[in-house]
Image (tube, rainbow, N blue to C red):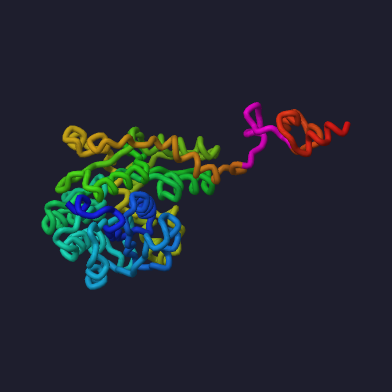
Amino acid sequence: MIGAIRPPAQQLVTVFGGSGFLGRFVVRALAKRGYRVLVATRRPDLANHLQPLGMVGQIHAIQANLRYPESVRHAVAKADHVINLVGILQESGPQSFGTLQAEAPQLIAEAAAPDARIIHVSAIGADAQSESLYARSKAEGEAGLFAARPDATVFRPSVLFGPGDGFFTRFAALARTLPVLPLAGADTRFQPVYAGDVAEAIAGAVDGTVPGGRVYELGGPQVQTLRTLVEYVLATTERRCVLVNLPWPVARMQGSVMGFLDRASLGLLPDDFVITRDQVTLLERDNVVSEAALREGRSFEGLGITPTAYEAIVPSYLVRFRKTGQFDLKRNAGPSAPPDLLAPESTGPDSNLQPGTASGPAIGQQASR
């Protein structure tokens, strides 16, 4: 109804967590459609990178903290649509699963206007019976949201990828540092999904083309084991690293030890090296779209979106993890390389000197002879 009454330029979308990884894709998708976007974040000064995604004045950051209900009410006071992208994989200080993932969705829904459209991003694996606190808190958040707003739309993506992600980039960084890489859950299956595709689904829900009151599961076109995905990272970055499958008891012990060391060091350990016991528990279950979601049209196919394969995106941002990055002339030079129009003479068999194909200094040198 909102879209039928007013054009996007006259509608305001409040995005909680809009300054995060998925947030920038969502803000870009909304800005392209012409919506006015209010980014609700704890640190508005860290959201300046979003400004170029829209026109002047189209995107604005506002201070809001999900631990303070009054700031949440202020952020959604005039919103026609409210999107919640906030989520954490690891608790840190006051940033707890209970506050941010179990309680916040209902808080946001109750604070929003009765006619505002509510969109929430959860995760595949959300389960009230799970041994993982992360998975339980996600399920509790969904339940609280639907209790407050039965017409809300929930998206559960599999592991996200895209420039700056915490999955492919993490393993690329580890492979650059470690000669041996232990894998917890090497045989666990994932369905990597491009963050841009998830953003399109969310923007579609804002447009009103995605029916509310349902939970959608979003996964990419391929289902792969964790080991296969890490091997792909090694091949793409041209790194050699020994992969060791950890038995579950050893993996759980590793998670307990690393979690303790991270807390004892007050979070000073590099994030790429830290894996908690709760995260190991998550790895014990496959992270793929369910058969029920596919059958009932609660997936990309049901939304009319063709998901992007990770091979089409990942190499573009993993190239920096190669030993020579994108500056390996020996590998890149060849018949398809651009002609060298500046050199006065050939510098070798790989120079690709073609002075006759265009004007320039090289032609002048040849002509003078």
- Toward which corner of the image does residue 239 lie, by quadrant? top right
Q: How many marks?
A: 0
Q: Is residue 83 left or right of residue 165?
A: left
Q: What percent of the width, then of the height, locates residue 47?
A: 41, 63
Q: Is residue 136 above or below residue 113?
A: above
Q: Is residue 315 left or right of residue 353?
A: left
The answer to whether one can see residue 178 in this image is yes
Q: Residue at x 16, y 35 (%)?
A: 296
Q: Is residue 33 left or right of residue 337?
A: left
Residue 290 versus residue 250: which sits nearer the camera?
290
Q: Residue at x 19, y 48 (%)?
A: 127
The answer to whether one can see residue 254 in this image is no
Q: Quadrant of the C terminus?
A: top right
Residue farthest along the top direction in this orientation: 335
Q: Residue at x 37, y 50 (%)?
A: 32
- Toward which corner of the image does residue 225 lie, by quadrant? top left
Residue 305 versus residue 264: which sits nearer the camera?
305
Residue 289 versus residue 198: which sits nearer the camera?
198
Secondary structure character of the magenta stretch overall: loop
Residue 143 versus residue 359: which sits nearer the camera?
359
Residue 336 part of the magenta segment: yes
The part of the chain drawn in magenta is 327-341
Q: What percent of the width, then of the height, locates residue 230?
A: 43, 39
Residue farthest along the right direction in this orientation: 369
Q: What percent of the width, then of the height, locates residue 80?
A: 22, 59
Q: Residue at x 38, y 52 (%)?
A: 28
Q: What percent of the width, then of the height, locates residue 57?
A: 39, 63
